Amino acid sequence: MTPFLPGATIGVLGGGQLGRMMAVCARQMGYRIVVLDPSARCPTAQVSDGVVVGALDDVEAARHLAHQVDVITLDTEHVPADVLAELEAIVPVRPGARVLRTIQDRLVQKQFLDGLGLAQAAWAPAGDAAELAAGLARVGRPAILKVRRAGYDGKGQVRINEGPEGPSRSIAADPVAQLARLRGEPAVVEAVVPFVREVSVVLARGLAGEIRIYPIAENVHRRHILHTTRAPAPMPEAQRARAEAMAVSVAEALGHVGVMAVEMFELAGGELLINEIAPRTHNSGHYTYGACATSQFEQHVRAVCGLPLGDPRALTGAVMVNLIGDLWAGGPPAWQHVLAVPEARLHLYGKYLAAPGRKMGHVVLLDDDAERALATAESLISRVSRA
Ligand code: AMP
């Protein structure tokens, strides 16, 4: 298949920070970018050649974008698969509707992983109270209820604790009350996993099926949001190979094209369970921009344009820390403290509103000494805050 060479136009569905960082890399390579987003001032639009203002489920707006571009990709997996299927009749869409249909519904994603024989937390459908009761009997407590669609960063998730049965039981222990908190959205319930750590495999799969794998990232979440990533994760060779093999089998079974991430829980005995799949560039891969020969964003451009994939090798160890909206509580953070650190790279996403829990940017520390870099990251976070 003929590649889309620099000079071609890439359409991006969704205008968040992932699209923005991809657009920066794509434009550096000589591509043009047009983005579809409800806001003309979204992070990606700020660095694009054009913007189509519209909702991600607005087929007419998406068609309008498709007619201006050579190939389409995604900033988010929450674009309805049916919209992608419509666009596939106009231009190549990578990843396509088939991948999104499998990923964007947690229930279908879990069935897909079961079908591949890949380990994950015990789970069950929880469409209504009766199904939830049966599901809880199967997976046990504590458990987590997750909406099937459109959840992210812990949104659309509630925990069901062990708690006493009877009239005095707490809301967190009452499955029906928890289901109600999800406002009637169909959900799945899964066992809380006693993981010792979380890791993710970020890889790219090209048009001809070739695969490039980045050094595995070790991730720490706070309040369900990624807080820090360190890479490479210290991991025995055999463990690394198993994690990579699991992620590769997911990418191949999906027929994915582009960058994708597979998040995993590691148990005390070393067993790996897949938490979730993201068919796009990923927060835990932000460190690659600066630390690796080819960033995940350039790699994604290469994959969706049908070009040879780049070298994913790390040139240095790295730590990434997310900058969450809460940091803005006392006014704009004092970025000069970050910029005074030679190994620090500051990325801000151009978001106008710094809401609590919102990802506003991140800092990457290029340092082979991960413990030192993690300590620097924490001290920077406290120093930039004016609260
Ligand atoms: P998710 O949005 O499903 O990736 O969840 C965000 C984070 O919540 C994960 O990275 C974990 O830290 C935590 N989490 C989600 N599901 C589970 C689970 N079944 N057991 C333990 N922790 C979980």
Image: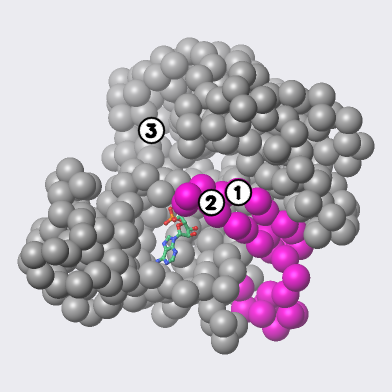
Report if residue 355 lies within the magenta region. no
Name the amino acid type tagged 3: Leu
Q: Nearer the viewer, residue 155 or 53?
A: 155
**Is residue 25 among what the camera can see?**
no
Q: Which mark is residue 87?
A: 3
- Tell which residue pokes out farthest to the right in this image: 342
Quadrant of ligand 1 in image? bottom left
Q: Is residue 257 above or below residue 266?
A: above
Q: Which mark is residue 222?
A: 2
Name the amino acid type tagged 1: His
10 Å crowding of disc 3: few (<14), some (14-19), many (20+): many
Give yes or no for contact between labels 2 and 1 (Cβ–Cβ under 8 Å): yes
Residue under the image location 88 percent in, 41 percent down: 343
Alpha carbon distance from label 3 to label 2? 37 Å
Residue under the image location 68 percent in, 45 percent down: 321
The region drawn magenta spans 215-243
Determine which residue is flagged by label 1.
227
Name the amino acid type tagged 2: Arg
In the rendered image, residue 373, in percent from the top left (x then y), is placed at: 81, 51
- Camera-nearest label, 3 or 2: 2
